[in-house]
Amino acid sequence: MGLTLSVWMSGMTDAGRASSSSALHTLAVPASSRLSVMLHSSPVGAGDARSHWSSSHCSPHFLLSPGGEEATRTPVEQSSDGVRAEKGVSSGLHLWEVLWSPAHRGSHAVVGVSGDNCPLQASGYNALLGGDLQSWGWELGTNQLWHGGQSLRRYPDVRTTTTQGVGGARPEAGSKTGPGSAVEIPERVLLVLDADAGTLGYVVDGCFLGVAFQDLPRGVKLFPAVSSVRGGATIRLRYLNGTTRDPPALMALCSLTIRRSLGPHRKTLTNTLPLPPVLQQYLLPNH
């Protein structure tokens, strides 16, 4: 069966290979096998507690939905406001989805992680997340990375030559930001936190953009967080999945290879694979 499948896949590789039309495609860097498996895995249930914003760790100018998955900033002038997730992590590789419409971001729309003592409200308009040593944030409008109250660099780099990703990766030393205007970031942004390696990165339009921050404190709980200055900004959080520092299982790696070969049409092509129905079902996307 393995030989039959290999021959079948070799004939399907070119047909199944998708080319991304995203402007971010040229800025993507290879992800680690752990992250790649996670990105192609089904998410955990929508009711997971790690999908909730914290009602006790947010600015008074943020209102939460009854389930806690959505946070909306009220119209208030001269105020920067933040909210962090209810649950944090101190180990493992984890993936969250943040949905934030570009039309409702305004200036200083920042997405990242924080410790449990990060300030969540301040006067004036600024990048609140990343404004201290307890938080790390990516400002979506300008693409600037913030930490310790300083703008560190633009992210993503115009060209990053890193050959590894979060979950066993470090960015190339001396990587520089190129010239040009900021890249437009769509509504859906994925946070990739490797608490074991102490790194934070982002996935946008299916493209892993590399390590944004490294040397995050290890063994300390970190929480997904956002900060905003725009009245009416609505931000949704969802925990997708996570894994330990152990290597991915062989079955997961094999299914990843098959899914990549099938490309975006795998939902309609899976039932043509020379595999038992139970394995075909395992390969189907569930999200």
Image (spheres, rainbow, N blue to C red):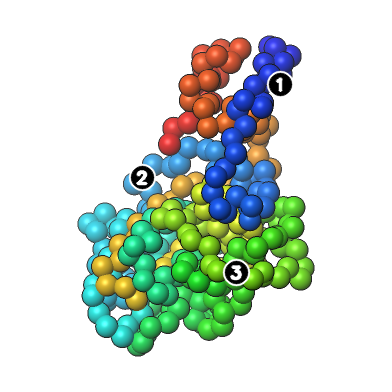
Instruction: Say which of marks 2 and 3 sits in front.
Output: 3
How far is the residue under mark 3 from the one under mark 1?
A: 40 Å
How far is the residue under mark 2 from the one under mark 1?
A: 37 Å
Q: Quadrant of residue 253?
A: top right
Name the amino acid, label 2.
Ala
The image position of residue 108, as x and y in percent, is 42, 75
Residue 112 drawn above or below residue 187: below
Q: Nearer the viewer, residue 56 or 148?
A: 148
Residue farthest to the bottom? 123
Q: Quadrant of residue 279?
A: top right
Name the element at disc 2: loop
- Circles 2, 1 touching at the beta carbon (< 8 Å): no
Identity of the residue drawn at 48% across and 31% down: 285
Residue farthest to the front? 180
Q: Which residue is mark 1?
A: 10
Name the amino acid, label 3.
Gly
Name the amino acid, label 1.
Ser
Which quadrant of the figure contains the N terminus?
Answer: top right
Identity of the residue drawn at 63% across and 56% down: 27
The image position of residue 81, as x and y in percent, is 35, 76
Q: Which residue is mark 2?
A: 46
Identity of the residue drawn at 53% across and 67% down: 182
* Mark 2 crowd level (few <14, some 14–19, many ≥20, 10 Å Cα): few
- Circles 3, 1 touching at the beta carbon (< 8 Å): no
In-image side of 166 versus 278 (left or right): right
Identity of the residue drawn at 60% across and 63% down: 156
Q: Earlier in the sequence, mark 2 or mark 1?
A: 1
Q: Which residue is mark 3?
A: 180
